[in-house]
Amino acid sequence: MPVPSPSLPLASRLLRWTGAAWFVAAVVGQAAFIVFILAFYGLRTATGNFAGWNEKPLIDGYVAGDDLGNLVFIAHVLMAAVVTLGGLMQLWPALRRRLPRLHRWTGRAFLVVAVFMALSGAWLTLVRGTWLSEVSAVAILGDAVLILVFAALAWRRALQRRFEAHRVWAMRAFMAVRGVWFLRVGLMAWIILCRGPVGITETLSGPVDIVLVFGSYLIPLAVLELYLAAGRSPRIALKIAAAALVGLAALYTAVGVFGTVAFMWGPYL
Ligand code: HEM
């Protein structure tokens, strides 16, 4: 058995701290996302002001006469608040430890709603024809496929009582479900850091758009894998490298969260 070097616990702690820093930025940003969805879409829907959905820039949103399209759109959007909240509750370690029954129920609800989000999003893209460019449509459909695969595997591993594998697939599902949120955060952080929409076009098909539409789920998934591998590994260098990357991701996320609140959602509330 290798004797642990004195800096191994420090590297592990560094990794946990940066992971926690990212989680805090994500909690703040996703809470803001939920508030925006309820205050903007929830309020207009509850008061019957369906045309008001289009008071912010959308591709289609409300379309007069398209009852089914409008229904799927608003169900998708309101469920986005539920899946975002459910995902956050699932990842909260204290809640998982203290209220395991609640964890199981919110977990089932999260996976069911995640599947609904992927299917309704795919319907809006493919059947309603709501997309900005072929490349952005392919990218978001890729995210939908990953959500379906990860949710199915997380569910299966839980039924098989393989809880460690279940936890890992559930975290992957969480990351894939966050794809559309990461996209908004990623775009805003990029625009703020570059002081303008460098490489970004109105149809989401510029070079930076392409990196971000695929990267919005592939990059967080890759960082998650590195974080998990570094957590398991006894190699100090790997832990420190992963901690540095997660720390950078936390900073980038924090800048993007500020941008979404200040420029993307705040002005419409
Ligand atoms: C699973 C997590 C998802 C969340 C939390 C989410 C959230 C949202 C939100 C909040 C909107 C309203 C638009 C806005 O105000 O910016 C929206 C619209 C939309 N989403 Fe999703 N979405 C998710 C997944 C997907 C997927 C996987 C697809 C495609 C396969 C998709 C396709 C769409 C489309 C086409 C619209 C309509 C946009 C428009 O009419 O302008 N979504 N989504």
Image (spheres, grey):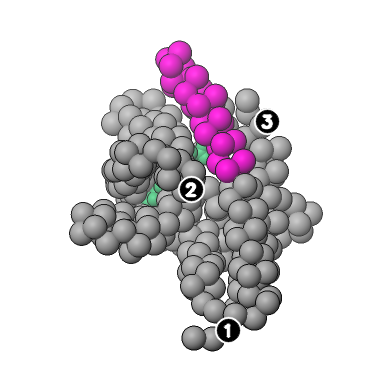
Kindly state the secondary structure of the residue where label 2 is placed: helix
Residue at 41% across, 59% down: 172
Q: Is residue 217 left or right of residue 251?
A: left
Please identify, in this view, whether the residue under mark 3 or under mark 1 is nearer the observer.
1
- Queried on whether the Cβ of the residue with tag 1 lies below 8 angstroms from ligand 1, the answer reads no
Question: Which mark, by number, is residue 93?
Answer: 2
In this view of the protein, which residue sits in the foreground, 26 or 37?
26
Residue at the extreme right: 195
Q: Amino acid at mark 3?
A: Pro
Q: Which residues are magenta?
A: 27-52
Residue at the extreme top: 47
In this view of the protein, which residue sits in the foreground, 244 or 234?
234
Residue at the extreme left: 160
Q: Amino acid at mark 1?
A: Val
Q: Is residue 116 left or right of residue 244?
A: left
> Which residue in the protein does label 1 denote?
3
Q: Quadrant of residue 5 in the image?
A: bottom right
- Queried on whether the Cβ of the residue with tag 3 lies below 8 angstroms from ligand 1, the answer reads no
Label 3 Cα crowd, 10 Å radius (few <14 / some 14-19 / many 20+): few
Q: Main secondary structure of the magenta part?
A: helix
In this view of the protein, which residue sits in the foreground, 16 or 222?
16
Whether residue 172 is in magenta: the answer is no
Residue 157, given in percent of the width and then of the height, sits at 26, 59
Please identify, in this view, whether the residue under mark 2 or under mark 1 is nearer the observer.
1
Kindly state the secondary structure of the residue where label 1 is placed: loop
Residue 141, given in percent of the width and then of the height, sits at 37, 57
In this view of the protein, which residue sits in the foreground, 118 or 162?
162
Q: Quadrant of residue 16 in the image?
A: bottom right
Q: Earlier in the sequence, mark 3 or mark 1?
A: 1
In the displayed structure, 234 sits above or below 143; it is below
Q: Earlier in the sequence, mark 3 or mark 2?
A: 2
